[in-house]
Structure formats: structure tokens, C-alpha cells
Image (spheres, rainbow, N blue to C red):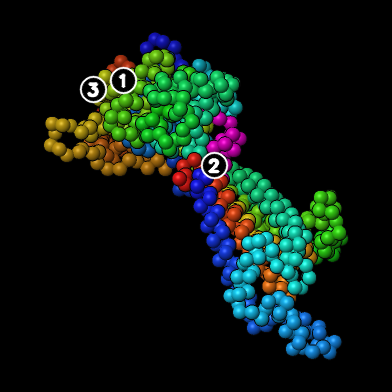
Amino acid sequence: MASEVILEVRDLRASFFTIRGEVKAVDGVSFDLARGETLCLVGESGCGKTATALAVLGLIQGLGGRILGGQARYRGEDLLTAPASRLRGLRGRALAMIFQDPQSCLNPVLTVGAQIMEPLRLHLRLSARQARARAVSLLQQVGIPLPERRLQDYPHQFSGGMKQRAMIAAALSCGPEVLVADEPTTALDVTTKAQILDLLKRLRQEREMSLIFISHDLGAVAELGGRVVVMYGGRMAETGDLEQVLRRPCHPYTVALLACIPDLGGDGRLKTIPGQPPSLIDPPQSCLLSPRCPYALPVCRRHRPELAEVAPGQQVACFLYPQVLARVV
Amino acid sequence: MRRYIIKRLLYTLLIAWGVLTITFVLLRLSPSSPADKYLLNLTARGQDISQVIASIEARYGLNRPIHEQYFQYVGSLVRGDWGWSLSTSMPVLELLGRHWVYSFQLILLATIVAVFLGILIGVYSAVRQYSRADYIATFFSFVGIALPNFWLGIMLILIFSVKLGWFKTYYDTALPILSLDNLKALVLPVLTLSTGMMAGYTRYTRSATLDNLRKDFVLFARSKGVPERTVILRHVLRNAMLPIVTIIMFDLGSIVFGGAYLTEIIFGIPGLGRISFNAVFAQDYPVVVAVTLIGALVVLLVNLITDVLYTYLDPRIRYD
């Protein structure tokens, strides 16, 4: 991965402030994203993967969140301290995002065409006619038949898979360098899911676009490849290349996640990780997995493990590894 | 769509006919007769009462059976003859023609003020939720909803007309309708009528805007780099309009009968409310029936317009 780094996230910390207290949704997340690279953020619901992406794009504030520290540099420019207008100019143009539920992400009272043309008119200042022509070609690229006619349709006239395709078309309209895909296949059926994953893979290759793929579905992650960040309780548990993380998982949480994948040859029972995900309100200064971890040591309940390299390119935050333990003792 | 509208118009006629029939019958079931009013005057002059009653009842057909009177009335109504106003001695249609404009201008102006300010304050309140401005708007809208229309009108007259002398205590009918002075004369009545509506629209707009601000499509719009003003106007408000339009149209129907009539009476505006108020006390049957019928027609048409408007506001609504 010697190619240029487009997005550099360092020690990102962001919280939601609720009536019950501060929810530390993102607590010290760091990663690099190179041009054309795929980065998968993996973890169970509420582990902070979506919050990480929203914080980087400056969208977390609109949802009651606040960025507390760290940096997110896009081509050297820190997005976290950039003025709102600058960030708005980058969103949809350089950095785009698609979301989990295409059903609710398209505005029901605007035509699909209007929603695809919106960023084109806004960022590229295209005329209505130019934007329309672009939108037709975008719909074609994402595989929607009869694009001229479908532009005038409203979202409720589209199927779930087609809505996700339309959302991808709108996000990609201005040719962004980074696309964040937040569980884009969760709300779709299995066949459609495979099609959307193929589409994302194809578009990423064609456009040399960087992709941040957020998912709890390790199958989908294996499909896309690239680098993987496993998150737990707002923190990074493990990171490495797809091969490393899937074949030689080091963190007990990654191991447990992999064990949960249904297995055709198994005993027919779905495996789960015992226990509950941790509450992120006032989290303790310990390993957040320790109450659920079968290998937990006394040190896990007193100290917070930091990431340390266990193999070239693979980092783990777990006291089972002497490299990690060495940092506290 | 056209078939739907035609169908609804036919329903409208049917319901209007029902309203007309009920009003007509109810009035004639009352124990006293319009002739009694004449009597009071005539007995004072020492005329022969029974003869006078007979001649009046014969003249207006009041001595005939009720169903005959009814068919005669409906028959002439269909031909465009709305009858004769007994208390004002002119055709009902002419009476309505002279006075409808006073009601119309009051309702129109009050609605415009209430809708415009209500939506503006409501959206601002929602966007700045829990700010000082939001708390102030919330406080005043609750006060506005709680204040009875007639009380507010009297207070406004007391403060602005009697104490401060800024306005006349009475609406001046001598002013030409399209003049600044007339507009000035309408300030207090419009304020009286629009306060409650505006307060309601503020609350409805605020909650509908808040609902939609939390929707995923707002997040997606922001992720496309859409400026916040466009997010609010194009994405949020368009979706919030449906419940707001519902309540505005509902009010438009109800103020025809309620608030506007009271306001007219307080400020002495000679609109349809005042006409029907006077007509009820004078037992001027044709005027009461006509004003009730017009009110019913307005409500029904407003309902139809609302339903058609829905299809423009929300493309998911289709009637075919």
C-alpha cells in the first residue's frame, strides 16, 4: 500500500450527549485510507462504526453528537476543524456516503431524479439539462433500466434494491474520492445484496475510488477485501489485512465474531457471543470485552489495552499478547 | 383524478342539500313566526292583529303546509332565487352580495397572517429546539391557544382603541374596501381572529418539522452537501406540510362558522356572521338558511381542495 493516503484519521474521539449521560461512541479510532483502497469497519450494533464515519464527515453534530478530539485529514486538511461551509462543499463532492436503509433515506416527496441531480447542480453548477443527462448515465451505471423514465419516478415506485442503487447513483454523482457505505446491504434480500456488493466493487475499481465499508456481516467484508478494522465499544480491537484478520484472528472478539458465522456443516445451532455489548456511558478504564471474554486476565479488568503490532500490518488491543502487555508493565 | 373530483362535487351537493333541508325544517318547527315581529310594531299602532297575520302569512306562503313551502323554496333556489329577506326588505342574494366581502377580507387576511407567521415561527422553533427563542415561542403559542377569541377582541379594543386611541373602536364601513385606511381598520379584527390559529400552526409546524428533521433522508441530504437552508425548506418542510395543511384547511372550515362570526360581532363588521346573527333574532328564515348553506358549501369545498392538495404534497397519495 504505497499509494497516496487520502484520508488519515488519528485518535478520533466523539460522543453523543443524552439525558442519561455522555455516550463515548468513538474512543480513539485511527486509520489510513489510501487511494482506491477498501477499508472495512466491522463490529456489532452500537460499537461506533457508523459514528466514526459520521464524525469524519461532520454529520454527527446534526444527530446530537460532538467531536471531542483527534484529527481526520483529507489530503492533509483536517476535516474536524474545517469550517462548516468547507465541509459542506466537500460532502457529496469528494466524500460521499450511502446508508443502511434505502427505504427511508430517499425523500418520499421528491422524484428520484431530483435527488440524484441535487449534488450535481449544487457542487458542479450544472444546468438542469446537463444534470439530467448526467443522472441518466448514472442510473445506467448502477444498473437501472429505462433511466430516462425512472428519473421522474418517486422513491415509492422503486423496489428496495433499486432504491439502494439510486442512492449509490446520488452519492457517486460528483465522482467522490471516498465513498462511505454504511451497511448498504443490511436491509436487502440475499440476491439483491450480492448484486449491490458486486456493483460497489465494480464502481470502486472503475473510478479508483476509496471505499469505507461498514458492516457487521463478515461474509460481505470477505467479498470486498482490503483492510479491516474490528471495533468494540467505540474502540479498535484489531486491525489488519482481510487475510490476516479472517485467517489468523488475534483478538478474542474477532475470534468470537468469526465463530458466529453460520456453518452448513455445523450442528445447526447459531452460535452467539455470550453477554451484552458494553454500555458506553461512563465506560471503565479496563478492557471493555473483559466481562464477556473467556480468556480475561486480572490485568484486563484494571487496564485498558492499547493497539500493538503482533504481525507486520496487524495490530491488536489485547493483553494476551506480550507486545500489548509490555505497554502497561 | 377528474372522476374523483366530479364524484366529490356530487357528494358536496348532496350534503349541502341535507344541511339546507335540516335548517329549513328546524326553523319552521320553532313555535313563533316571523309575523310576530311585525305584530309587535303593528299592535302598537292599533291595527287589527288577525288580519295582519293572515296577510303576512299569505304573502310569504307561511300558511301553507311545510312540505309545500319546502318544495317551493328549493324550486326557486335551483332557479337562482334565494328568497326575500323579511327583516331587511331586500332579496337575500342582494343582501349576501353586499356583505360577503367583509367576511371574506377578514378571513383571508387572518389566514394569511396566521399561516405565514405560524409556519415561520414553528420552523424556527424546531430548528433551534430548546433555545431561548423556542421557549418564548412555545410560551406564547400556549397563551395564544388558550385565549378565547371574544375575550382577546374586547381586550384589544380596550387597550389599543380606548386607552391608546390608535384605532377606532368600531369597524368603519364607510371606508372603501381597497384602501390603506380599511387595512388599518382591520388590524385588530385580524389580530383577534389570527392569534389562536397562528399559535396552533406554530405548534403543529414545530412538531412536524422536528419529526422530519430526524428522518434518514435529512441525513442523506446533508451527506450530499446540501446547505442547511435547503435541507429545511426542500427536504423537511415539504414533508412537514401534510399535517400542517390538514389543520389549516380544517380551521378554514371552522372559522367560517366560529371565530370569524364572533369577531365580526365584536368589531361591528357587517359580514355574513353579523347578517346571520341579526337574521336569527329577527327570525328572517331565508337569510338564516342561505348563510348556513353558504357555510356548508365553503366547508365542503375546502375539504375537497384539501384532498386534491394532498396528491400534490405527497406523491404516494392517489385517489384513482
* Quarter residue B45 falls in: bottom right
- Placement of B137 over or under A280, stated as above or below: below
For disc 2, the chain is B
| Image depth: mark 3 or mark 2 in front | 2
Q: Is residue B254 left or right of residue A185?
A: right
Q: Which residue is mark 3?
A: A248
Q: Nearer the viewer, residue A145 or A322?
A: A145
How packed mark 2 is, by other alpha carbons closer than 10 Å (few <14, some 14-19, many 20 or more), is: few
Q: Is residue B27 left or right of residue B171?
A: left
Instruction: Read off the magenta span.
Output: B224-244
Residue A141: percent from the left, percent from the top? 41, 20
| Image depth: mark 2 or mark 1 in front | 2
Residue B146: percent from the left, percent from the top? 64, 63
Residue B8 in sight in this render = yes
Q: CA distance from mark 3 to mark 2?
A: 58 Å
* Quarter residue B156 falls in: bottom right
Q: Nearer the viewer, residue A238 or B70?
A: B70
- Give the amino acid type for the residue marked by disc 1 in the picture: Gly
Q: Residue at x 20, y 38 (%)?
A: A270
Q: Nearer the viewer, residue B83 or A282?
A: B83
Quadrant housing the N terminus of chain A? top left
